[in-house]
Amino acid sequence: MHNQTNQIIKVLKTYANNRKRDVDNNLESKELSSLLLEKYAVGMVDVVRVLGLKVNIDAICAEADRLCFEIDKNTIKNRELRYKNYSSLDLSKKRRSSQLKHIDIYAYEKNASGEFILEGEKYTLNSSDSCTLVQQLYDEKGIDLYDATLLYSIPIGKIKSYLQTGIEAPNKFAREIDKWEDLGATEIRFDLC
């Protein structure tokens, strides 16, 4: 009995780790991930009962609850809300990839004569900072850098305002924007790599 219980819990933990990875990679919400894990565990327990296996179902359920809580600290509250209210799955939000290698950001000057890149003025955000910035611009400002067919432009004043009102970026990037503004840049462009 003990050995089979441990084997089932091991499979459950593997599934939970996959769910956590998807949350960490911004592929699904922690609420959805926890729900999927909960339903997976319910299915496992149903199979155990149908097959009449001699395993500790309470241990499996306790481990499932613990793993769900690891993924979503509000899992119990969310479960109660699901039982009380109509639940749906919102698939309208675009997936945010954590697979960005980096973002190259260029300074541009736009004037009556046209648009000009400021020669040699480029800043590169690493993968982690890129993912954070892309997600925050989408969530808080509705700017979808993934939707841009070309380089996505944001006026210098606007990006400075975003940084002052809570969009996170490295301090060095903020200083670079100030420098570009002093050099006459009017906008920055993002090139996702």
Image: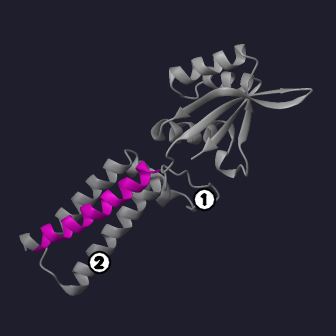
Residue receiving disc 1: 90
Amino acid under disc 1: Asp
Residue 5 at x, y = what percent?
A: 14, 70
Q: Could you say where residue 84 lies in the image, as x and y percent from the top left?
A: 50, 57
Q: Is 61 part of what is drawn in magenta?
A: no
For mark 1, does the 10 Å Cα neighbourhood hold few (<14), some (14 to 19), or many (20 or more) residues? few
**Tag 2: Cα neighbours inside 10 Å, few (<14), some, or many (≥20)?**
few
Q: Nearer the viewer, residue 125 or 14?
A: 125
Work out whether 128 lies above or below 59: above
Quadrant in which the N terminus is drawn: bottom left
Q: Is residue 24 magenta?
A: yes
Residue 75, x across and y down, in percent: 39, 51
What are the residue bounds of the magenta stretch? 4-25
Viewer-closest of 150 and 44: 150
Question: Which residue is depicted at the point 27% across and 63% down?
Answer: 14
Which mark, by number, is residue 46? 2
Q: Residue furthest top?
A: 182
Image quadrant assignment for residue 54: bottom left
Q: How many circles with numbers are drawn on the protein?
A: 2
